[in-house]
Image (cartoon, rainbow, N blue to C red):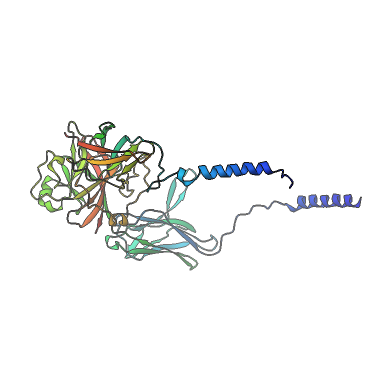
Amino acid sequence: MIRELLYKTAFILCAVTIAIGCKEEEYSVPVPKSGLQNDCIKKSVGPGLAGIDIEFMYAMAIPESEGKLISAQVEASIPGASETYLEHRSFHTNAIGDDIGIPVASPSVTDGAVTKINFNVDTNAATLRYYYRPAPDAADKEVSFTFSATSSNGETASYKMGPYKIRRMEIAPNLAVSDGNRFYISIEDMAIYNETEAASIPDKIDVLYLFRTINGITFGHSFVAPAADAVYRPGITLPNGVNRNTKIQKAWNVRDIHLGANAGTGNNSYVYLDDEDFKTLNLSAAPNYAINMLAQSGIWVETADGKYRGYIYVNSINANGSAVIGIKRYKL
Amino acid sequence: MRKSKYKNLFLGLLLIVAFAIVRCSKDSFPVDEDGLLITDRTSAYVGSFDLVDPTHQTVVIGTPVVDTVAQTIDLEVRFGTDLTSLWPRFSLITDAKLEPKITGFVDFSDLANPKQWTVISGNRQVRKVYTVNVTVQQP
């Protein structure tokens, strides 16, 4: 009988404990840490190379009661090209997902390796975007960044990012070629020439672009070395001296994002060609022509003098005998 | 001695084990030097054939014609195909294997001396030599 009593008492005690013990905590807004805070993330992906921006987002804030932001600056270990800048608008994402930029300073000033802005509105929190354009002389080097901000109460906060390797490869995207007109491709100059221009620099022409409709075979859009068999360059009389023998290997499903593989809708490449791909490329057994090219195909090339290896990507082809290509090359 | 009530059970188990030892011995599953099973099949022929280029796309126009009596495979490749670097893909009858092994790209450029492969049957006794005749499409 005592046992029963004890059980009942224990049960009632437990129930009461649960009833009064589980009190819901009232929500209160978190209190930010005191002082100037900052944070940074790298927004762009893929290997860094001259001509392609490396993008960062730098956030800085100080509690409103303690002061406001005065200036922000970025120091790069290697001075960037003149297109390097620190965005003077602070961006945030609104309710429908659009990025809205509010000007908080005048445009940035770059002095050597330091890019700086001074805030000209009263603000205690901002996220600024930094765009670094590697200069050609940064190839094969590593670059690091120091982001810093100052506030009106005399504090400075800084954040280090890097190091990032700047590759040796170079790109020339979105070049237009057209059959019979501008179809002399030079890997050395990363440019397209017509017949007159090509005649003056015959030793720089590496690849010819052709478009032919021939009964019985599919010739279509093609890349042919000047020294290739005449049957692969029908109807062409080359200027004197245009006779380089470039190694050409057709490739399918090598869609480099730097050359624009994901521009436009529906494309889903995840490939960035890197220095290593060109270093390990073996074209010793490759032919010197590639016919019947389709959009999003490409060719691996190696110049006759062994100076450059490259990849030419076909962005698009047109039925009238023209195409848009992009060149990525690596100096050996 | 008292008769064990499990005597029949033990006898049954003994029979099963003996049967397993005899039936599952290595001699019932002979393998050749490549580790492939040698079976009783005597047929040795090619079912289908394909040639791919270094982009791993086929270069054949239409379907290769496989003649299992004359032991030839005739096919036409697209104009502009680089014949020095093509990868042949054979489909063989069950249990047959190919000799020499295909380990990479093959040079088909010598059209006067077509390349040949030997199909060996499942019991490894029957050998048939197949010749691959390549013609290039011309304009």
Camera-side residue of B124 and A280: B124
Q: Nearer the viewer, residue B37 or A142?
A: B37
Q: Is residue A321 above or below residue B102?
A: above
Residue furthest to the front in view is B1
Q: Residue at x 27, y 60 (%)?
A: A136
For the view shown, which residue lies furthest in the right direction? A1
> What's the residue at 43%, 45% (across, down)?
B30
Q: Position of residue B97 (x, y in %)?
A: 35, 41
- Residue lying farthest left? A240
Extreme residue in the bottom direction: A154
Percent position of residue A200, x then y:
10, 51
Q: Is residue B47 left or right of residue A198?
A: right
Q: Quadrant of the C terminus of chain A?
A: bottom left
Q: Looking at this view, is B71 or B115 the one in front? A: B71
At which x and y percent is residue A255? Answer: 32, 46
Residue A52 lies in quadrant: bottom left
User: For this view, does A120 lie left or right of residue B77?
Assistant: right
Residue A116 spot, x, y in % from top left: 38, 62
Above-or-below relation of B115 to A276:
above
Can residue A313 be seen from the camera position used here?
Answer: no
- Tell which of A57 and A180 is nearer to you: A180
**Residue A288 visible, this orientation:** yes
Give the tally of numbered discs.
0
Residue A112 sits in which quadrant? bottom left
